[in-house]
Amino acid sequence: MRDGSAQDNHFVVDPAKFDFYAMDCYRLVGEDKRARTLAEEVLRAGTDFDGTERSPMRNAEARVTLGVTAARDGDLEQALTMGERALAGDRRSVPSLIMTSRELAAEVRRRYAAEASVQDYLRRLQALGREKPGFLPK
């Protein structure tokens, strides 16, 4: 460590990313209200006043989190809308979206498999998986 900054020690959590990391943790353990609140904060902090996204990948994962929590809450339309918006950005870091996208796919498949909109969404994810191998399970 040269000067003690967070960039010098990869074991130090960047305070600006704390809500992002906590959001993932809460989503993974099923604390949906907390995950949703933090996802909304991540989106707020990652978006400029004019709508420009400062943190597109964090925002994408926050949208997937909102999709997962919506699916668990019975709101399929919101779940799919957030899932689509997460994938719509120009920048996609495949490794960072793997876990959350798999979670959303599993939630909608488990809860709403018979819905045509879910089948369309899952086909889109599968197509993305073919474009970017390793993105989603087959």
Image (cartoon, rainbow, N blue to C red):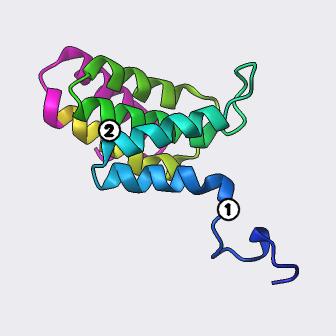
Relative vertical location of residue 25 with respect to residue 77 in this rendering, above or below? below
Quadrant of the rendering where the N terminus is positioned = bottom right
Residue in the image at 26% along x and 22% along y = 75
Give whichever of 111, 134 is nearer the camera. Answer: 111
Q: Quadrant of residue 47?
A: top right
Label 1 sits on residue: 14
Looking at the rendering, the stretch of residues picked out in magenta corresponds to 110-138
Residue marked by disc 2: 104
The x, y position of residue 19, in whole percent, is 55, 50
Identity of the amino acid at label 1? Asp
Query: Quick one: SS at disc 1?
Result: loop
Number of numbered labels in the structure image: 2
Work out how far the residue at label 1 is from the one at label 2, CA to CA, in angstroms: 27 Å
Q: Earlier in the sequence, mark 1 or mark 2?
A: 1
Residue positioned most to the right: 3
Q: Residue at x 41, y 29 (%)?
A: 83
Q: Is residue 138 left or right of residue 60?
A: left
Pinpoint residue 7: horizontal percent, then vertical percent.
77, 69
| Amino acid at pointer 2 | Leu
**Quarter of the image where one finds residue 35:** top left
As drawn, which residue projects farthest toward the bottom?
Answer: 1
